[in-house]
Image (tube, grey):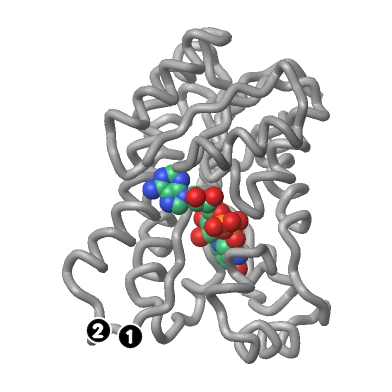
Amino acid sequence: MRTERTIVITGAAGGMGYPFVRRFLDNDDTVVATDTSADALDRLSAEMASDRLFVKPADIAKAEDCDTVADLARETTGRVDVLVNAAGFFPVQGFLEMSVEDWRKIVDINLTGTALMCRAVLPLMTGRGWGRIVTIGSASVNEGVPGQTHYVSAKAGLIGLTRSLAREFGGEGITVNLIAPGVTITPAAAKALPREIQEAQIERRAIKREEKAEDLVGATFFFASPDADFVTGQTLVVDGGLHMD
Ligand SMILES: NC(=O)c1ccc[n+]([C@@H]2O[C@H](COP(=O)([O-])OP(=O)(O)OC[C@H]3O[C@@H](n4cnc5c(N)ncnc54)[C@H](O)[C@@H]3O)[C@@H](O)[C@H]2O)c1
C-alpha cells in the first residue's frame, strides 16, 4: 500500500468530502483540500486536526482558482499523486424554468470545473509514472432525473472526460476512473431531494437501506491505490445494487 502521497480533494468540506479526507489522512497521506467556503474549510481543519491537511478556498468553475489549488500542492510537496473530484452542485429545477445562466452554472461546476481541476493538477502528476484521478459522477445518468436535466447532462459528460483522459494519460501511468453513487444521504442531498425520491431509491435497491457518504470511501480509496493499477476509464456504480449492467 502506498502512503505519504499528496492527495488533492475538491468538495472537501461537503458530505462526502469529510470521510474522504479522513481516509487519506489515516493512510499517512498529505491532503490539499479545497471547497468554495473558507469558513467551511476552517471547520474541516478543526475537525481533522492534522498537520498533513492543507486547505485552499476555490471555485472550481474558475480556471485561475484551480491554479491556486495546484500552486498550494506545488508549494507543499511539489507533486500530486491523487486527485479526487468530489465537488458538485445538484439543485432541482424544471427544464422549462431553467435560464441559460442556470444551465451554464450547473455545467460549469459539475463538468467544466472538474476538467479545469484535472488540467491544473495534471502537470504535477505527469513525468513520474504514477498518478490517479478519481471523480464522483452520478448513477442518475443511467435513467435520467426529471428536474435535474442540467446536472445529469453534466454528470454524463464526466464519463467522456474520464475515458478520454484515461486514454490520453495512460502512457504516463495515470489512471482515471469515475464513481457513480446513488442518492446518498448527505446533508445537502437530504435538503435538495424530496423524501419520496430518497425512499423510492431504497425500495429499488438490492441492499435496502440509505446510502451514506461512507459507502463511497472504499471505492474511492481502491481506485486511488496500487491495487487498481490496471483499471482505467471505468465507471463504478455504487448504489446498493439499484442499477446492474
Ligand atoms: N448526495 C447524493 O445523493 C449524490 C448522488 C450522486 C452523486 N453525488 C455527487 O457527489 C459529490 C458530493 O456530493 P455531496 O452529497 O457530498 O454534496 P455536498 O454539497 O455536501 O458536497 C459538494 C461540495 O462541493 C462544493 N462545491 C459546489 N460548487 C463548487 C464550486 N464551484 N467550486 C468548488 N466547490 C464547490 C460544495 O461547497 C460542497 O461542499 C458531488 O459531486 C455530487 O454531485 C451526490
> Can see residue 136?
no
Q: Nearer the viewer, residue 42 or 28?
A: 42
Quadrant in the rendering for residue 122: top left
Q: Nearer the viewer, residue 39 or 65?
A: 39
Left or right: where does residue 8 sit relative to residue 166? right
Question: How many residues crowd around disc 2 within 10 Å: few (fewer than 14), some, or many (20 or more)?
Answer: few
Above or below for 57 versus 95: above
Q: Which mark is residue 94?
A: 1
Q: Position of residue 6 (x, y in %)?
A: 62, 20
C-alpha gap between disc 2 and disc 1: 5 Å
Q: Residue at x 65, y 64 (%)?
A: 187
Q: Residue at x 24, y 77 (%)?
A: 98
Q: Which mark is residue 14?
A: none
Q: Residue at x 65, y 38 (%)?
A: 43
**Number of marks present in the image shown:** 2
The quarter of the image holding the N terminus is top right
Name the residue beneath numbered marker 2: 97
